[in-house]
């Protein structure tokens, strides 16, 4: 994993960049990241289709010790994975189909309290920023356009008090 020199995203209170070379590494990153997460945390995942957002979330689910397979939430708006270990549930959201933003989720009757959960949102850009000052934004890019190249560059940016001073240089 390397850390090329580049400016931190504007407004971020913590940032890190790493290169991953295989899906397993992306899943591992999720598992490692899970150790940093607390109830009420919001994680936004950005990246084109096939970038690895769901793969990362699968690792998060493993790291959090939640029930149920993490799969693409494309055909549901949100899926709740309860904790098997007394920790926070994982709420995995596909914001693509969420018109208004996360406040709309309160109407979904998810049977879980968002402040007690870790909420991971795919396609949340432009929809969830206004709802909380604190969020972890994970951007995943293919290094090259080719879909058979496994390299991904991941940028982690924490925003708000929650992430101030948190070391995101994982791995
Ligand atoms: N380094 C990598 N990280 C994550 N996924 C990878 C990587 N290299 C190849 N892949 C493949 O890319 C696809 C990513 O799919 P997925 O995680 O569902 O993406 P998204 O949710 O962003 O659409 C999987 O088929 C996975 O095996
Ligand atoms: Mg996905």
Image (spheres, rainbow, N blue to C red):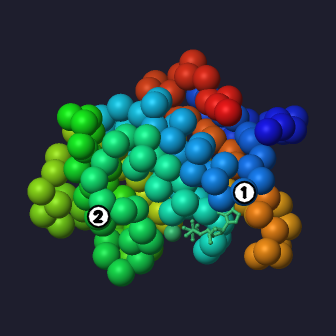
Above-or-below relation of 68 to 118: below
Question: Image quarter for residue 168?
Answer: top right
Query: x and y percent of residue 7 in the render?
Result: 80, 37
Query: x and y percent of residue 96 in the render?
Result: 44, 73
Please tell me how crowded label 1 is: few (under 14), some (14-19), or many (20+) other residues with Cα within 10 Å: few
Q: Residue at x 36, y 62 (%)?
A: 69
Q: Residue at x 59, y 45 (%)?
A: 28
Q: On the picture, is 31 further left or further right than 29?
A: left
Q: CA distance from mark 1 to mark 2?
A: 26 Å
**Element carrying mark 2:** strand
* Residue to which mark 2 is pinned: 79
- 77 or 7: nearer the viewer: 77
Question: Which quarter of the figure is the N terminus placed in?
Answer: top right
Question: Which quarter of the figure is the C terminus placed in?
Answer: top right
* Residue to which mark 1 is pinned: 22
Query: x and y percent of residue 145 in the render?
Result: 82, 73
Q: Is mark 1 within 8 Å of ligand 1?
A: yes
Query: x and y percent of residue 117 in the render?
Result: 27, 43
Q: On the picture, is 134 further left or further right than 15?
A: left
- 136 or 103: nearer the viewer: 136
Q: Residue at x 52, y 37 (%)?
A: 33
**Element carrying mark 1:** loop
Q: Is residue 36 visible?
A: yes
């Amino acid at each position: 994993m390397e850390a090329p020199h580049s400016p931190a995203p504007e407004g971020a209170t913590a940032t890190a960049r790493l290169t991953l070379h295989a899906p397993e590494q992306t899943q591992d990153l999720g598992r490692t990241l899970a150790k940093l997460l607390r109830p009420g945390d919001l994680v936004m995942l950005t990246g084109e289709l096939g970038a690895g957002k769901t793969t990362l979330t699968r690792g998060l689910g493993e790291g959090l010790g939640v029930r149920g397979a993490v799969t693409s939430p494309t055909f549901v708006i949100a899926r709740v994975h309860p904790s098997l270990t007394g920790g926070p549930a994982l709420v995995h959201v596909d914001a693509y189909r969420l018109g208004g933003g996360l406040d709309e989720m309160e109407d979904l009757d998810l049977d879980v309290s968002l402040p007690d959960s870790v909420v991971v949102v795919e396609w949340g850009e432009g929809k969830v920023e206004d709802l909380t000052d604190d969020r972890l934004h994970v951007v995943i890019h293919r290094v090259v356009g080719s879909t058979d190249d496994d390299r991904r560059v991941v940028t982690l940016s924490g925003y708000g008090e929650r992430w101030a001073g948190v070391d995101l240089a994982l791995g």
